[in-house]
Every structure is written in structure tokens, then in C-alpha cells.
Amino acid sequence: MKLLVTGADGFVAGSVVGQSSPSWTVCSLALTPVAYQRPGLTWHVFDLRDEERLRCVFKEFAPDAVIHTAAMADIDFCEANKEVAEAVNVGVTRNVASLCQEYNARMIFLSTDTVFDGKKRMYSEHDVPDPLNFYGETKVRGEQIVRGMVERHVITRLSLVMGLPVIGAGNSFLAKTIAALKEGREVGFPDEEIRTPVDVITLGRALLELACSEYTGYMHLSGMDRLTRFAMAQRIAERLGYSEERVVVKNPSAIPGRAPRPRDVSLNNSLARKTLKTPMRNLSDALDLVLVAQ
Ligand SMILES: NC(=O)c1ccc[n+]([C@@H]2O[C@H](COP(=O)([O-])OP(=O)(O)OC[C@H]3O[C@@H](n4cnc5c(N)ncnc54)[C@H](OP(=O)(O)O)[C@@H]3O)[C@@H](O)[C@H]2O)c1
């Protein structure tokens, strides 16, 4: 198996690269150098907007499968920087899709629950996207490109990803919460946006399984529990033995520059549970998994 991973210095990709089989050849594309090494793993550090460089990598490596995680994944940044969000989330996705089709590679695309408007709940793969922010818009367009251009594709929609970075850094909600709790600081989270968090270890395994499978189409990857970030942080505090009183409700309108967020984009993961060997977990099992993996 020859696997190519984009955004390999990112949070989710760290779990993919770190858990990939030692018998595979893995080509990791990153914007920032990462120290992690193992036999069969190579790193290429460049900006994916460099089309020629990307083409050279495909030509040299000829991947069997590509897990395309690279993106501008910060919702507020995308709202304020539409041009760069468009260039990376749409433009780079188009180039990766075109090369996957040309080299007959499976393409696993990472989309988001934020493609939905949040007016209903437990969205299935059949529900129609209607995003409320620019990040969601770029992801919908990425989905359409992948679906239209790549025969052997999977479009995964991820719920909020919870965990600690496996390799590299990453924007981890859990790491920030634990750091604040350890230092005795109060942590504030909105109590009105409902998600179905998936842990980063399970997610990495599911993406690797999809890279090897013959499945084509959409798939929602999410956990078994439906809850807000505030409730999640309370469960984390309880699990780690800190007082839940340190977790407070934060009004989202008090967060400057915050792009609109859908209220309830909980995802229905029945298809993933039916199709994958990787089990989707409840928050308690997911916390055990990510804390033990450290
Ligand atoms: N984390 C979540 O809760 C969540 C939820 C739903 C969907 N997703 C999706 O899952 C994917 C992975 O998210 P993540 O949390 O792992 O985000 P992340 O940690 O920010 O990873 C994204 C990676 O893409 C890289 N990247 C951005 N622009 C690039 C460019 N022009 N050339 C090369 N690399 C570039 C970033 O590099 P630098 O960091 O060096 O800039 C980063 O390593 C994204 O597609 C995201 O939209 C994530």
C-alpha cells in the first residue's frame, strides 16, 4: 500500500500517519517540518498551492490512496480571509482530485458537519448541505469537486474532533481544556452548539480503513454522544478529577470575530457503524482511548 497524506503536520493527519501500518509506504506532505520518522515514511515540505510540486510528488510516488486532510480549518480565520480559504479548501482540493483521478488513486476527502445549517439534528448522508459560514461553503464546494472528478472517492464528514496530538501539534480542544484545568484556570465554552464529537484515534483508524476499502460515497464519522462543548468540557473535568465548577458557560456573542455557527449539527453515524470494522465510540470510551494513548 502506498498512502499519501496531505496536511500531515496537522491534528487529524498526525493520527493517520502515526497509526498507519509499518508495512506501508507513506508519503507525508506538510507545510511545516515534523520530527517524527519511521521506516517507509517520507516527508515533503511545501505549500500545496504549488501545483507543479504536487504533480511531481504524484508522478514519483504514484499513490494507491490519498487522505486529503490539508485545509484552512479555522472557521473564524476562513470568514476573515476568504481568498486564502478558497485557494486552499477549494483550489488545492481541485488539484488533488484531478491528480487522484489521473493516477487512479482512491481519494479520501475530509469535510465537516459544518456543511449543514443546524436547524435539524442527527444529519444523515442523504441530508442536503446548507452552510452558515464561509468555511462550510468551501467544504461543500470541495465535496462537489471530489464527487464530480474522482471515481474512487470517499467524502467523510467529521464532527468535532477530540483528542491530543499523536504527532506534530494541532489545535486540540482537549489539550487546551486540560492545560487550563491543571493551572486552576476557569474554562468557558458555549452551551448552545450541539455536536457528536469523534476522538482523533478512532478517526485515524476509520480513515485508514476507508483508504483500503472499496467503499465509495459519503460517510459521517462521529461519536455516539450528542452534546455541547460546555457539556464535553464538564465530562473531561469529571474524568480527570477536577471540579466541574471550573467549567463555565461562555456566550458565543462575547467572542470577538466569531463566524456564525450552526446550532445542532449532530451527525448520524449508522452508515459508518454498519460499514466499518472500526467502532464509533461514546465520549467516555473515547476519552479513555485518547488519554491512554499518551
Ligand atoms: N478538527 C476538527 O474538529 C475538524 C472537524 C471537521 C472537519 N475537519 C477537517 O479535517 C481536516 C483536518 O483538520 P485538523 O483539525 O487536523 O486541522 P489542522 O490541524 O489545521 O490540519 C490542517 C493541515 O493543513 C495544512 N495546510 C493548510 N494550508 C496548507 C497549504 N497551503 N499547503 C500545505 N498544507 C497546508 C496545515 O498546515 P499548518 O498547520 O502548518 O498551517 C495543517 O497541518 C480539515 O480538512 C478540516 O477541515 C476537522
Image: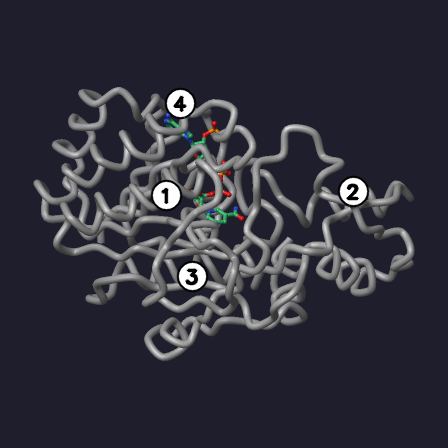
Q: What scheme was used to colour the molecule?
A: one colour
> Is 239 left or right of 61, judged from the image as shown?
right
Calculate the distance from the C-alpha at mark 4 to the C-alpha at mark 1: 13 Å
Quarter of the render that holds ligand 1? top left
Residue at 85% from the left image edge and 46% from the top image edge: 182
Residue that badge 1 annotates: 139
Q: Nearer the viewer, residue 255 or 13?
A: 255
Eye-nearest disc, 3 or 4? 4
Calculate the distance from the C-alpha at mark 1 to the C-alpha at mark 3: 22 Å
Tell me the element at label 4: helix
Calculate the distance from the C-alpha at mark 2 to the C-alpha at mark 4: 31 Å
> Is 10 left or right of 106, judged from the image as shown?
right
Q: Which quarter of the image is occupied by the N terminus?
A: bottom left
Q: Amino acid at mark 2?
A: Ala
Tell me the element at label 3: helix
Residue that badge 4 annotates: 84
Eye-nearest disc, 2 or 4? 4
Q: Amino acid at mark 3?
A: Arg
Tell me the element at label 2: helix
Q: Nearer the viewer, residue 76 or 242?
A: 76
Q: Is residue 103 above or below residue 271?
A: above
Q: Mark 1 near ligand 1 (CB under 8 Å)?
A: yes
Tell me the element at label 1: helix
> Is 100 left or right of 260, judged from the image as shown?
left
Residue 193 screen position, x and y as percent: 64, 55
Q: Amino acid at mark 1?
A: Lys
Q: Nearer the viewer, residue 110 or 117?
A: 117
Residue 218 screen position, x and y as percent: 30, 61
Going from N to C along the chain, the mark reached first, 2 or 4, is 4
Q: Amino acid at mark 4?
A: Val
Going from N to C along the chain, the mark reached first, 1 or 3, is 1
Disc on res. 179: 2
